[in-house]
Image: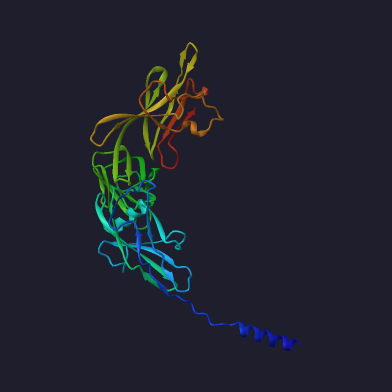
Amino acid sequence: MQKYLIILLSVILFSCKKDYTLNTNMQPVAKLTAPLDNKYIKLQPATSATLSFEWDQARAEDGSLVIYEVAFDKENGDFSNPVAKYSSDGGGVQNKLTLSHKDLNSIAGKAGIASLSTGKLKWTVLASKGYNIQKAAESKLIEVERPNGFAEIPTDVYLTGTATEVGDDLSKALKMKSTAPGVYEIYTSLKNGKYHFASRNTGTPTTYSILGTAVKEGGEGEQTAGTKVYRLRLDFNNAAATVTELTTVGLWFAPLNKFLFEISYVGNGTWSIKNQLITFKQESWGRDERYKFRLAVKDSDGNAGEEWFGSANSDNNRPTAATALSFWELRPIAGNDQWGYCYKFATEADTKNCDINVYFTTDKNYTHEIIVK
């Protein structure tokens, strides 16, 4: 019985077996439908703006799915070596591609269109079924205007060089703080020497430098004015650089309407003063303890100014051991109103020596601490 069962199964399997060959035959995309040929686009890569590319479907002989890629090339390119390729929406199955202006800006940069320039990109669609890849029967152009900025914005930015606090050992480079997409800053000192910025602190990174009020790829800056404290801010969205000298940091005591003392820079984005006597002001209603900070600054042309940093709240209670750490965070505040957005010293600070540390460091939110001795 077992012998007959084996023979029967063999007959069934043999009768079900068929030769199957993948049918890769198809007709390529015949027409690109959007955008219109030579459409002009003013790129806005810092926004959520997008552009839609659309085309007629390719036709597979067996009616199965076709996979699409959109290829981009220089205006006179032939797509033998396109500057970029993107799978269509839906993982490559839709006859549509939604591309952000950020990606288009990157493509334009790869095609040699410079910042603040206008140029043309050629695009077409590659339809594939198995190993059969067919280029669309036509291609079209789009004309793009690039903003002043970098097509490829670095994920991280580091400061390095002989002028920096850590020298020119790349592995020890100072990481800058990301304050907004594409914007980085650092509070630090520079001594006489050279410095530049790097996209990473290992290998062979992309480097940048400051030229006047602009960020450019490559090059080096040079400090020749002796050791000074600066805030260096780089905006890669519009290739802008701001160099601000920080001449003093002072503690403003609101009850006396004046600065009590200056706080010295000690390195690594930190200002500190030790064993400073703090005495509240006696008022008819009690003892007043409100304070905030002022930074005296100079711009790159040497013009003097001031910046104020205080609380996120317009008024506060005295902090206790249970107060959230966010209470001490430093927030830029407008104007020099005597009372607005002040912190309050803790009760135990009155008539005591205190250490005061102000942190404009890149590893956490800008903040400060009061240590009662």
Residue 371 versus residue 290: which sits nearer the camera?
290
Quarter of the image for residue 210 reads top left
Please tell me which residue lies in front, 195 or 81. Answer: 81
Where is the N terminus found, in terms of image quarters? Answer: bottom right
Q: Is residue 100 left or right of residue 304?
A: right
Q: Position of residue 367 (x, y in %)?
A: 44, 34
Q: How far across and how far down the image is residue 50, in percent?
A: 38, 51
Query: In the image, residue 85 lies at what x, y percent?
Result: 37, 62
Tell me, yes or no, if residue 334 can be seen here.
yes
Q: Residue at x 44, y 75 (%)?
A: 24
User: Quarter-wise, where is residue 245 in the image?
Assistant: top left
Task: Give 289 or 310, whichever is nearer the viewer.
Answer: 310
Q: Is residue 96 above or below residue 22?
A: above
Q: Is residue 199 visible?
A: no
Q: Residue at x 25, y 37 (%)?
A: 300
Furthest-right residue in this view: 1
